[in-house]
Amino acid sequence: MNYLSLENVTKSYGEKVLFRNINLEISKGQKVAIVAKNGAGKSTLLRVIAGIEAGEGEASKVRLAKGVRTFFLRQDPEFYEEHTIIEAILDSDNPLIQAVKAYENALLHPDDLAGMEKAAAQMDDLKAWDFEAKIKEILFKLNITGLDQRVKHLSGGQKKRLAIAKMVIDEPEFIILDEPTNHLDLDMIEWLESYLQNPNLTILMVTHDRYFLERVCSQIVELDRGQIYRYSGNYSEFLHKKATRMENESIEYEKTKKLYKKELEWVRRQPKARGTKAKSRVDAFDDIKEKVSNKRIDKEVQIDIKGQRLGKKILEAHYISKSFGDIKIVEAFSYKFKKREKVGIIGPNGVGKTTFLQLLTGSLRPDEGKVVVGGNTVFGFYTQEGITLQSDKRVIDVIRDIAEYIPLDKGQKLTAEQLLERFLFPRKQQQVFVSQLSGGERRRLYLLTILMQNPNFLILDEPTNDLDIMTLNVLEEFLMEFPGCVIIITHDRYFMDKIVDHLFVFEGDGKIRDFNGDYTDYRVIQKEMEIARRSQARKLEQQGKEQNKETKPGLSYEQRKQISRIEKQIAKLEEKKSDIEQQFASPDITPEEIATLSKELAEVKEQIEEKELVWMELVEEG
């Protein structure tokens, strides 16, 4: 069954054609990702599919299957700002949610007995009582509290979690997601990744999260020069198949080029008056000439700006502490940075990671202790907020305001125009206003303004938001070779794993732990500790149940026997779950094995939840 069909979909803005006459079908159960360079039209295509924007021309058609529940998770979710959290959740056409909403309203008017009876009857008819409990369970899982809080007071991350909760509660069959991991912390990203692996979901997404592409997607669609190319498989397979396509295109171009030279000689030898056969050959020559003139020129960002040399003393924190009221952000933290050190910072949203960076760079003073910055240390601080410029500022003026010329190694230098070209801003685009750039293009421009200051200590707070995969790959290579120090806060697990040597783990209440390893190493150890903790808790629980067996007159022999059997089944399932999770840590694991193990893990988790629910019901009977 086709959930989505695109026919001859075209979209342009002025002279810029984003895509022309593209066709695409997505069937039930497929999980498809769209990848492309910044500014190619990924988000625009999603908005056309979702009906927010229209395609161009009568031939342009977008068909969504009737009766299929569809949800569009925007990059920056939109809500009615005056709604409370619970009002935003219940703002849905889903009949079950409408029933819950009517019942919640009835509870506010206890004197209206008729209204209460009608709402309760509707809950009965739709079997919505369990659904109400499910809503609260989902909100709890996503750490959404204070349901009377108004949406306008929520942060970007809280709004994203609210939108995800709304999506899960609506129980859609087809989900369209635009950069779903932006503004989420790492734990929330892993939870969302697990949810999207559900085989009953059909997905179309735009994301730069390469672990998402690797573990969730079964097909990748590349939007390139206004056309789409489909690749079956996940991210690893996409890279391999794209390289093969590019190689084939290059071979085909060389053949066409040789044919063009041959036909050009023939055309030059021909008299002006030609017969029908000759005219046909000339027409064919024109087609060959067009193919040769449209040679593909793939450019990528070139980052060759080198940082200044670091001195012996780089950056030192001497027992620094910072609190806001009763909330401890940092407590007695000490550390001395070394040359070429690359540190990742992880912890839940709101724990104080950005505040910590402000303490290190001197924009915020500690309550206790001191920060000592080396005499040669030059910070380059890339913040979450990004670039803030007047809407009528031209791209070239942004760079010229910093410098007309940029010094490189060996006495070389680049003009502002040349530097922008290396960051994929051609001369024509350098004259456009900043307001006309896409989110990713603005981020790329902002990154350039940071690097132009020739820093030797880079601090990057969520640098991957809105950047395309091609730019991320180049940035990663640059940072790996960067001779200075780097501190990174990012929700992009792939990006962090590739660059950092160790982590500062924010554990809450001001505690910061130095972990020797990357993010994947950290998660493996965390999971092992969690498995051990749960195993110990279950063992203690089992011992308690054994002691209380004889004091449960309400349980029959058969019920006790059933409880014992279920407990053994749960223990075996936990062992299986632990075994699967350990297999993920293997460095030799293949993409196919990851996909298979992900499905097995989801099934085992579901079985454990079912068994635990039955166990609880039996125990409560006693």
Image (cartoon, rainbow, N blue to C red):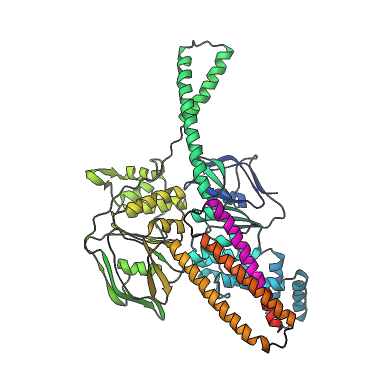
Residue 521, located in which quarter of the rendered image?
bottom left
Q: Is residue 258 above or below residue 458?
A: above
Q: Quadrant of residue 23?
A: top right
Q: Residue at x 57, y 78 (%)?
A: 539
Percent coordinates x, y for residue 388 in the rendering: 40, 58
Residue 322 percent coordinates (x, y): 35, 76
Q: Is residue 308 above or below residue 360?
A: above
Span shown in magenta: 590-611
Q: Quadrant of the C terminus?
A: bottom right
> Foreground: 123 or 594?
594
> From where the camera sits, is residue 546 visible?
yes
485 to the left or right of 574: left
Across and down, in percent, residue 2 comes to 68, 48
Residue situated in front as seen by the camera: 67 or 400? 67
Q: Provide the major secondary structure of the magenta segment.
A: helix
Would residue 168 appear left or right of 349 to someone viewing this image? right
Using the image as rendered, state which of residue 196 and residue 520 is in the foreground: 520
The reply to whether residue 101 is in sight is: no
Tally the numbered discs.
Answer: 0
Residue visible at 61% across and 52% down in the picture = 50
Left or right, 195 with respect to 244, comes to right
Q: Is residue 592 magenta?
A: yes
Please tell me which residue is depicted at 61% across the width and 60% down the height of the picture.
Answer: 600
Q: Position of residue 367 (x, y in %)?
A: 32, 77
Q: Residue at x 37, y 77 (%)?
A: 323
Residue 117 colored magenta?
Answer: no
